[in-house]
Amino acid sequence: MANNIRVFIADDHPIFLAGLLSVIGRREDIEICGQAANGNDALAFIRALKPDVALLDIQMPGMDGIKVAEACLKENPAQKIILLTMFNDENLVRRAFNTGVMGFVLKENAVSQITFAIDAVAANGVYLSPQLTKVLAHRPEKKDSARDEMFTVSEKKILKLISEGKSSREIALALNVSGKTVENHRGNICKKLGITGSSSLLRYAMQNKSQFD
């Protein structure tokens, strides 16, 4: 089918990989276009296959998942990547999102969450395992009244919904506005903050959630 989501998977644990393949394989609209067991092969395959979404284990032989993501996104900033990890680690989450990765899933939750993550990232959204949203948000920035005042009422509403993990489509429905309006607001917010990318905006919104209540 033309509308299938083409997914590439890289993981060096055969049992975990088999579990992912089994879960994803239940979806007729998701196509596994390739797989690898180490970072070097993963990078080569992603370059050649250009999948819609790449799932990368952080810990792999050769290049680790974050290094693969950095290389992919440097060459193709539009590449959508989800990282898989065994560790609920703040530094890993922050490092990953600083590279432009759009999804981060704990392996212990991967079976139940992976298709939700693929759907979200394929639709230009961001996905984090629920446990990781707490990690990313647990160290809020000091309230900055000058920065807070730079946002319009509409922008604050959108920031609040972004902090709750809502996609642009969900925000548009919640506020009864068009998707284009939401994207315009997101762009204006990023310009005011001097940041780029959905992951950076998500991180800012979550770290400053209390300012938009």
Image (cartoon, rainbow, N blue to C red):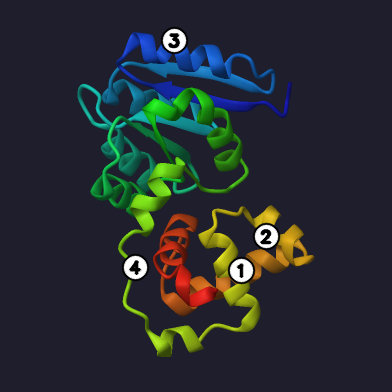
Residue identified by numbered label 4: 140
Residue located beneath label 3 in the image: 18
- SS at badge 4: loop
For image coordinates 42% across by 66% down, the residue present is: 204
SS class, disc 1: helix
Task: Answer with mark 4 or mark 1, whichever residue precedes in sequence.
Answer: 4
Q: Measure the C-alpha gap from mark 1 to mark 2.
A: 7 Å
Residue at mark 2: 171
Of marks 2 and 3, which one's residue comes earlier in the chain? Answer: 3
Instruction: Count numbered badges in the picture.
Output: 4
Label 1 or label 2, whichever comes before in sequence order: 1
Residue in the picture at 41% in, 45% down: 101
Task: Determine whether 2 is above or below 146 in the image.
Answer: above
Lower sequence index among marks 1 and 3? 3
Residue at the disc numbered 1: 158
Q: CA distance from mark 2 to mark 4?
A: 23 Å
Q: Left or right: where does residue 140 sit relative to residue 125?
A: left
**Residue 112 coordinates in the image, percent (x, y):** 52, 26
Residue kind at label 2, given as amino acid type: Ile
The one of 8 and 200 positioned closer to us in this rendering: 200
Instruction: From the top left corner, tell me how far across and down residue 75 is, in percent.
Output: 38, 44
Taking the spot 35% from the left edge, 24% from the top edge, the residue there is 42
What is the three-letter code of the residue carrying label 4?
Answer: Pro
Three-letter amino acid code of the residue under disc 3: Ala
User: Does residue 67 appear left or right of residue 72 in this picture?
Assistant: left
Q: CA distance from mark 3 to mark 4?
A: 38 Å
Residue at 59 percent across and 63 percent down: it is 161
Can you tell which of label 2 and label 4 is closer to the viewer?
Answer: 4
Circle 4 residues within 10 Å: few <14, some 14–19, many ≥20: some
Decide if residue 179 is in sight here: no
* Residue type highlighted by circle 1: Ile
Mark 1–mark 2 CB contact (< 8 Å) = yes
